[in-house]
Image (spheres, rainbow, N blue to C red):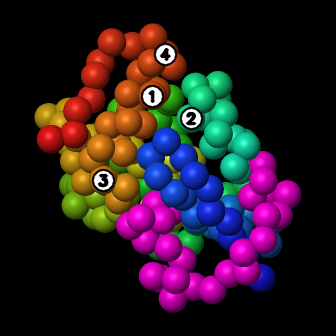
Amino acid sequence: MRTMIFMDSPIGKLQLAEEDGKLTHLLFAWHNTLADYGLEAEEKETPLLKKAKKQLNEYFAGKRKVFDLPLAPSGTAFQQKCWEGLRTIPYGETRTYRDIAAYAGNPKAVRAAGGANHNNPISIIVPCHRVVGSTGSLTGFGGGLEAKAFLLNLEQKGIGGDKVWQAK
């Protein structure tokens, strides 16, 4: 049985879902919800969803740099490898789509890596916002470029960095 909750965040309402004790989704509710994917879930705060909400609030408060949650994103083998690559990007750093494609074993599959990034079902925790274009520019993000810039700036502040990201 899949369960879910909504939570407010500095970038808008988020939807979190879990199944069998693992987080399956963290969606930007203003863009997509489970219902948009034809998925049903009971609205109920489980211990795992409560823990995920707590860790997200700590992240947004600048007090958490690493998430400690069991994850179960559903996707192809290539997508899974790309999402694994996303989880290796340190807090406050960025990588390119080419870097993610190379991590997944095919450096020429840049567009496919971009597609995997776009289909990441566990945003923020699986940090797709840390992927930028080959020139270092902000490109595509399911939550919108303003949300991506917000997350990257939050992390820059957390590491004492001076880079400022702007959505254009």
Q: Which mark is residue 159?
A: 4
Q: Are marks 2 and 3 in contact (CB under 8 Å)?
A: no
For the residues marked 2 and 3, what is the alpha-carbon distance in whole angstroms? 17 Å
- What residue type is disc 3 on? Gly
Q: Which secondary structure, mark 3? A: loop
For the residues marked 2 and 4, what is the alpha-carbon distance in whole angstroms? 14 Å
Residue 11 as seen in the image, left or right of residue 4: left
Q: Which residue is mark 3?
A: 144
For the residues marked 3 and 1, what is the alpha-carbon distance in whole angstroms? 16 Å
Q: Nearer the viewer, residue 62 or 126?
A: 62
Q: Which residue is mark 2?
A: 60
For the residues marked 1 and 4, what is the alpha-carbon distance in whole angstroms? 9 Å
Instruction: Pinpoint residue 146: horizontal percent, then vertical percent.
Output: 30, 44
Residue extending furthest toward the right: 47
For the point 29% across and 58% down, the residue is 114
**Magenta part of the protein: which range?**
27-51
For the point 69% across and 70% down, the residue is 4
Mark 4 packing: few (<14 Cα in 10 Å), some, or many (20+)?
some
Q: Which secondary structure, mark 4? A: helix
Q: Are marks 3 and 4 in contact (CB under 8 Å)?
A: no
Q: Is residue 106 visible?
A: no
Instruction: Pinpoint residue 140: horizontal percent, then vertical percent.
Output: 25, 54
- Residue 47 located within the stretch drawn in magenta: yes
- What residue type is disc 1 on? Leu
Q: Which residue is mark 1?
A: 154
